């Protein structure tokens, strides 16, 4: 499942293909993948959906908050905005003019740009989707429901959010309303780097340990973005130009349950928190 580094890698690789381009047309192949401001598309006049999907507008930027992407036509509150969520298996990529569209059965939306390039949303499992918003103000409202972006999280911001919850720290980190962008891979990697056991109640962490955790989250995410994200064995994650990431080669704990800790040599533990497989080192990570 794409987390912040994968979504950021998609954003960065997509930008040169779409920024400044006028959207010449859009082909919605599967209508239920497109929703309108959270409301199902059914009943909305087709022309409104085309306009909402930016037809006739010029793309100004591709933004990201947590794991969500937004394509916007400007900075003013009345600019248009479309949110793209990759969910479990979603891909958003650019196709050069004349290029063959691979694996077309899972392609749900194709935007045609004035350059002749296409922007494609493909999602085999359909946990992702495209959301048409009324305007940029609606995007700000939507994103205000998310916690601060994990790529720039600071200790005091994180402490303020953690002190009110007794949930296990791993569970708290997965809550997108508390912190936006961290999923299963980067929660485990960050907790390992910060030396914190994943079951530690969030409100029992001292300010010093929370500051260390915030630093570990930023570091892990920045390194993962620099490595183009993590491409796992399921093969679904590639950036907007089709390139896989290689941060999976540097995972310290994720996917390594039962193997030796690279720091202390102890066998890594594996368990479930919120039904998500969690891997940690009992030697390097402490609760108290
Ligand atoms: Zn260890």
Image (tube, rainbow, N blue to C red):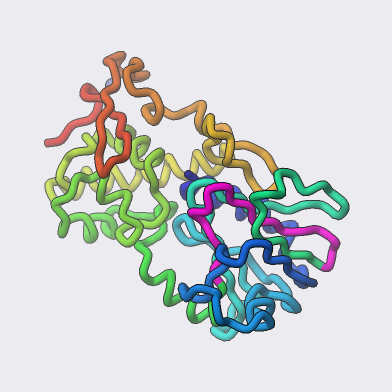
In this picture, residue 19 sits left or right of residue 98 = left
Residue 65 position within the rendered picture, expressed as x and y whole percent measured from the top left = 47, 61
> Which quadrant of the structure image shows residue 266?
top left
51 is higher (above) or lower (below) than 108: below
Front residue of 72/232: it is 232
Image point 28% across, 29% down: which residue? Answer: 280
Inspect the magenta stretch and tell me whether residue 159 lies in it. no
In screen coordinates, is 178 left or right of 135? left
Q: Locate residue 192: give its quadrant.
A: top left
Q: In the rendered structure, which segment of residues is drawn in magenta? A: 114-131
* Left or right of residue 129, residue 175 in this image: left
Magenta stretch holds residue 119: yes
**Residue 265 pos. (x, y %):** 31, 14
Looking at the rendering, the quadrant in which ligand 1 lies is top left
* Identity of the residue drawn at 58% across and 47% down: 124
Taking depth in this image into account, of 100 and 228 the one nearest to the observer is 100
Q: Nearer the viewer, residue 101 or 271?
A: 101
Q: Is residue 161 above or below residue 133?
A: above
Residue 96: where, in percent of width, then height?
82, 52
Q: Residue at x 58, y 82 (%)?
A: 44
Q: Is residue 188 above or below residue 14?
A: above
């Amino acid at each position: 499942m794409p987390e912040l580094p994968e979504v950021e890698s998609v954003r960065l690789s997509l930008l040169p293909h779409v920024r400044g381009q006028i959207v010449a047309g859009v082909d919605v192949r599967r209508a239920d993948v497109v929703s309108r401001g959270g409301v199902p598309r059914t009943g909305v006049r087709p022309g409104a959906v085309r306009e909402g999907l930016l037809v006739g507008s010029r793309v100004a930027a591709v933004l990201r908050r947590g794991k969500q992407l937004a394509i916007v036509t400007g900075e003013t509150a009345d600019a248009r905005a479309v949110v793209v969520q990759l969910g479990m298996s979603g891909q958003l990529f650019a196709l050069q003019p004349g290029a063959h569209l691979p694996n077309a059965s899972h392609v749900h939306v194709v935007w045609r740009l004035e350059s002749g390039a296409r922007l494609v949303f493909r999602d085999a499992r359909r946990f992702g989707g495209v959301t048409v918003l009324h305007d940029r103000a609606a995007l700000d409202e939507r994103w205000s429901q998310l916690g601060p972006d994990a790529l720039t999280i600071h200790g005091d911001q994180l402490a303020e959010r953690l002190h009110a919850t007794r949930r296990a720290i791993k569970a708290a980190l997965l809550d997108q309303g508390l912190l936006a962008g961290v999923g299963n891979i980067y929660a485990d990697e960050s907790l390992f780097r910060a030396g914190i056991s994943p079951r530690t109640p969030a409100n029992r962490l001292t300010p010093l340990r929370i500051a260390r955790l915030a630093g570990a989250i930023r570091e892990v995410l920045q390194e993962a973005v620099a490595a183009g994200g993590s491409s796992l064995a399921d093969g679904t994650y590639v950036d907007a130009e089709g390139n896989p990431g290689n941060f999976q080669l540097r995972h310290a704990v994720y996917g390594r349950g039962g193997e030796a800790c690279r720091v202390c040599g102890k066998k890594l533990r594996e368990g479930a928190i919120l039904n998500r497989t969690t891997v940690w080192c009992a030697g390097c990570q402490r609760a108290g």
